[in-house]
Amino acid sequence: MTIMKTLVLCVDRDDDLGTKAGINGPVIGREENLKAGIALGLADPEEVDANTILAGLQLYDDLTKRGMDAEIATIAGDSHVGFQSDLILTNQLENVLEVVKPDRAILVSDGQEDEAVYPVISSRVKVDFVKRVYVKQSRSIEGTYYMIIKTLQ
């Protein structure tokens, strides 16, 4: 029986991790992601990407408690969202895949903007599940904000 390795992949397309916490992606491993999530949360307690990393850690812990072979990583793009950020994300993703060598992935994001890179991710690794993280006070605000911004562009 072959044990499959699962990558829990957190995505920060606009690089709040770098701009607010000074941490460059990719961030690989539980301890490094825990440090990154706490640093980002301390830099900006309202930053949803900190919640995304913590949700990824919770998912990673759950998988490992079940005896699954798993790893967690966070990739971060650029504040200029679009081609520039997605190219950075793609390079970081390829680095993560080379290091971790997963058979499958679970994408953890905070909404539609981060999930826009789903085709890039799924073209390189099988994505079994997408976990969307919401801040309870603003469940639909980010999705609505994203739609408004896209409409105005």
Image (spheres, rainbow, N blue to C red):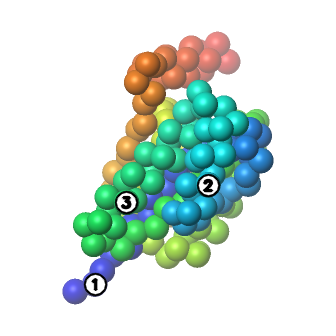
Quadrant in which residue 3 is drawn: bottom left
Helix, strand or loop at disc 3? helix
Location of residue 147 with respect to 118 vertically, above or below:
above
Residue, disc 1: 2
Q: Is residue 125 visible?
A: no
For the point 60% across and 46% down, which residue is it?
A: 38
Instruction: From the image, state whether disc 3 or disc 1 is nearer to you.
Output: 3
| Image quarter (top left, top right, bottom left or bottom right) of the N terminus | bottom left
Residue depicted at 57% across the width and 39% down the height: 49
Residue 90 point in image, percent of width and height:
64, 57
Of circles 2 and 1, which is in front?
2
Q: Residue furthest left?
A: 1
* CA distance separating discs 2 and 1: 32 Å
What crowding class fits label 1: few (fewer than 14 Cα within 10 Å), some (14-19), or many (20 or more)? few
Give x and y (percent) for residue 39: 66, 46
Q: What residue does disc 3 label?
A: 61
Q: Is residue 13 left or right of residue 78?
A: left
The mark nearer the N terminus, 3 or 2, is 2
Disc sitting over residue 30 in the figure: none
- Dots 3, 1 in contact, CB < 8 A: no
Rendered position, 6 above or below 58: below
The residue beneath circle 2 is 35
